[in-house]
Amino acid sequence: MRTTKIDISKVYRSRCAAGHKALWHNKDFNGLPFDFLAKVDHLLSRFRETLYKETYTSDVVAGALSPYWAEKLGLQEGIPIAVGAFDAHMGAVGNGIKPGMLSRIVGTSTCDMVVAPYESMLADGKERLIKGICGQVDGSIIPGMYGLEAGQSAVGDIFANFRDWFSSMIMEGMKWNTTESRKQLNDRIYDMLTARAAALNIVPTSTGAAKAIGEVIPSLKGKIIGSAIRVPTPNGSLCHFVAELPAKQNICITEEVNDLFKKMSASKYKHILEYADEALVSSDVVGNPHSCVFDSKLTTCVGNNAIVVGWYDNEWGYSNRLLDVIKLIVK
């Protein structure tokens, strides 16, 4: 808390954060969406009355810089502090965003933003809803205009990881070792990556999933490797997993592999794993709450190698696992 306000109930809540991340809407929901939260899980509906109802745009003063933080930062006590907003949204303001202009901010993720005057967002006196984006919030970017956002999760991190890996390979081969050389090379690689059309290319990249599994399940650490390919689809992902079975298992049998996954999907991992007999494509799993939809038709066995395929909606599956965590905390 960098302001003199110490009562948490009196803190000004950011319109930007509440609207885009917590589904806050003044007219339709009178704050946070009670009915929606209750439908997702009845436990979530309890939180609405204990949380905020009012939000504020970034032209509003949230408070004054406290003596403690003034001394710590070497600034003058009492400096006005505005209500905050997401870094990408403020980046769009710094970029001079205005109606008719698309501002793209690349950071950990990529955020595409536009602003629209009130009158352009009305149809028959009601707010028009734009489909296929992450959200539209009154005043989230520029006060007095609607802020509309669409994002691509982790794009910045993926570019950086691939750039660093690629530049390390080149520099090792050329024996470069100066900071300036690495920076120049990284900049050139990044330019090459960002110049490619995402809707027209299959883009090889890296993944941290294999490493993360080793951290969660220590017995698998160092035994799994992985890579990723980005393809021009709006949503729906696929994992192609190859496992080498112990020699004592003799030979992999497709039916036995499928039976194992089918058994687990109906018991221990019922709400996490779904078993599918029908042929699937990526759009079939959009909105599916399971972390994996096992595609039994694509199971293959070659000697001791079992090859299985799982589909998933990364954002929605992950969101449902977060709900599982919340339930555990509430209990």
Image (cartoon, helix red, strand yellow):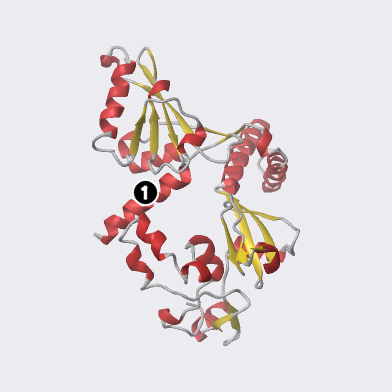
> In the picture provided, is 246 more to the left or to the right than 69?
left
Q: Residues within 10 Å of mark 1 (few under 14, many from 20)?
A: some
95, 65: nearer the viewer: 95
Against 42, is 49 above or below? below
- Taking the view exactly as shown, the residue that stands out farthest to the front is 124
What residue appears at the point 57 percent right and 87 percent down from the top-left corner? 78
What residue appears at the point 50 percent right and 61 percent down from the top-left corner? 21
Decide if residue 17 is in sight here.
yes
**Residue type at tag 1:** Arg
Against 67, is 25 above or below? above
* Mark 1 residue element: helix
What residue appears at the point 32 percent right and 67 percent down from the top-left corner? 46
Name the quarter where the C terminus is drawn.
Answer: bottom left
Image x and y of residue 173, in percent: 65, 30
Image x and y of residue 71, in percent: 54, 83
- Residue linked to disc 1: 321
Against 281, is 56 above or below? below
177, 46: nearer the viewer: 46
> In the picture provided, is 8 more to the left or to the right than 144?
left
* Quarter assignment of residue 165: top right
